[in-house]
Amino acid sequence: MKTEYRTPLWKEDLKPLSAVEIESVDKGMSFIHVYGAIRYVDVFDDPQKVPFHYRWETAYQSWFGGTKFGQWIEIKPKNDEKKET
């Protein structure tokens, strides 16, 4: 018997960030985290779960005129902090 996993990618209460919230993220005072788990059934018909957690980080390139850029940083749990999602 195959198990189907269906989870919405977002909830209805999500809204675009305001200018104040964007500025707070740019200054490193607030953070955007994306986390969850991908569930699938492998070729041996065994259910698998791969958790993920990323944080958006804004930085400036000092060697190129202070140009702002952003990137997703993977957050890896410590062995004793792994939790089921």
Image (cartoon, rainbow, N blue to C red):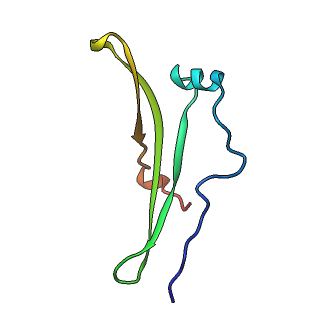
Residue 13 to residue 9: above or below: above
- Considering only vertical position in the picture, is 79 above or below 69? below
Q: How many marks?
A: 0
Q: Quadrant of residue 43?
A: bottom left
Q: Is residue 24 above or below residue 9?
A: above
20 relative position to 39: left or right? right
Quadrant in the picture for residue 40: bottom left
Which quadrant of the rendered structure holds the C terminus?
bottom right
74 or 62, nearer to the observer: 62
Q: Residue furthest right?
A: 13
Which residue is at a point 63% across and 32% down the rendered structure image?
A: 17
| Residue visible at 55% across and 72% down in the picture | 5
Toward the top, the furthest residue is 65
Q: Image point 44% across, 49% down: which residue?
A: 77
Q: Position of residue 80 (x, y in %)?
A: 46, 54
Residue at 48% over, 39% down: 55
Looking at the rendering, which quadrant does residue 72 occupy?
Answer: top left
Residue 22 placed where, x, y %? 58, 25
Q: With 30 as the anchor, is 63 left or right in this view?
A: left
Residue 33 image offset from top left, x and y in percent: 53, 41
Q: Position of residue 4 (x, y in %)?
A: 54, 77
Residue that lies at the very extreme toward the left in this rendered image: 63
Q: Is residue 30 left or right of residue 70?
A: right
